[in-house]
Image: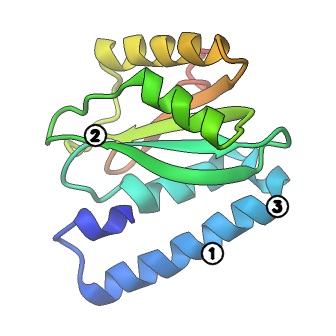
């Protein structure tokens, strides 16, 4: 689980966050319509990625009703970058029989301004997934105090 990589949390805080993540993940699986809310996605991602000390790239794989099939941290990086392989994202989507997905990564610096590399990666992942009839719904960047949605910025 992503929370295990942060050293700044106490064991009690980490246990509380793991519990909250289990509740949110179950809610996202059971109640598909609630997952259509950007705020529920933000809450989930904030707990998963918000306090990490290195970059992590996560995929939320969804079924045809936009219900969560699985949330998976796909790639781990350094303080400033993560190498992401679109082929591996597509492979996981096919294995899980996902209809669509949302990708997210954190910026340990706390800033959520997307880099040109972030924009290029989003485009490449979207194009790769389109070849296998899987739709990329959004890309979130998780910063310290805010979470940026590419879709809300008009990037989709």
Q: Is residue 153 visible?
A: yes
44 or 77: nearer the eye? 77
Q: Is residue 155 visible?
A: no
Alpha-carbon span between mark 2 and mark 3:
29 Å
Residue depicted at 56% across the width and 10% down the height = 127
The mark that comes first in sequence, 3 or 1, is 1
Q: In this figure, which residue is indicated by the disc labeled 3?
A: 31
Give percent across and percent down for residue 69: 69, 52
Residue depicted at 45% across the width and 76% down the height = 18
Density class for disc 3 (Cα within 10 Å; few <14, some 14-19, many ≥20) is some
Q: In this figure, which residue is indicated by the disc labeled 1?
A: 23
73 or 55: nearer the eye? 73
Residues at marks 2 and 3 touching, judged by CB atoms closer than 8 Å? no
Foreground mark, 2 or 1, reads: 1
Q: In this figure, which residue is indicated by the disc labeled 2?
A: 107
Give percent across and percent down for residue 92: 54, 37
């Amino acid at each position: 689980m992503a929370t295990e990589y942060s050293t700044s949390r106490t064991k009690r805080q980490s246990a509380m966050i793991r519990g909250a993540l289990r509740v949110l993940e179950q809610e996202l699986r059971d109640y598909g319509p609630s997952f259509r809310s950007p705020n529920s996605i933000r809450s989930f991602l904030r707990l998963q990625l918000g306090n990490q000390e290195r970059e992590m790239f996560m995929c939320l794989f969804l079924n045809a009703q936009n219900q969560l099939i699985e949330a998976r941290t796909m790639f781990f990086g350094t303080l400033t970058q993560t190498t992401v392989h679109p082929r591996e994202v597509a492979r996981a989507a096919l294995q899980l029989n996902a209809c669509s997905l949302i990708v997210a990564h954190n910026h340990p610096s706390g800033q959520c301004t997307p880099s040109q590399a972030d924009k290029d990666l989003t485009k490449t992942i979207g194009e790769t997934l389109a070849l296998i009839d899987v739709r990329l719904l959004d890309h979130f960047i998780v910063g310290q105090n805010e979470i940026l949605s590419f879709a809300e910025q008009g990037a989709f």
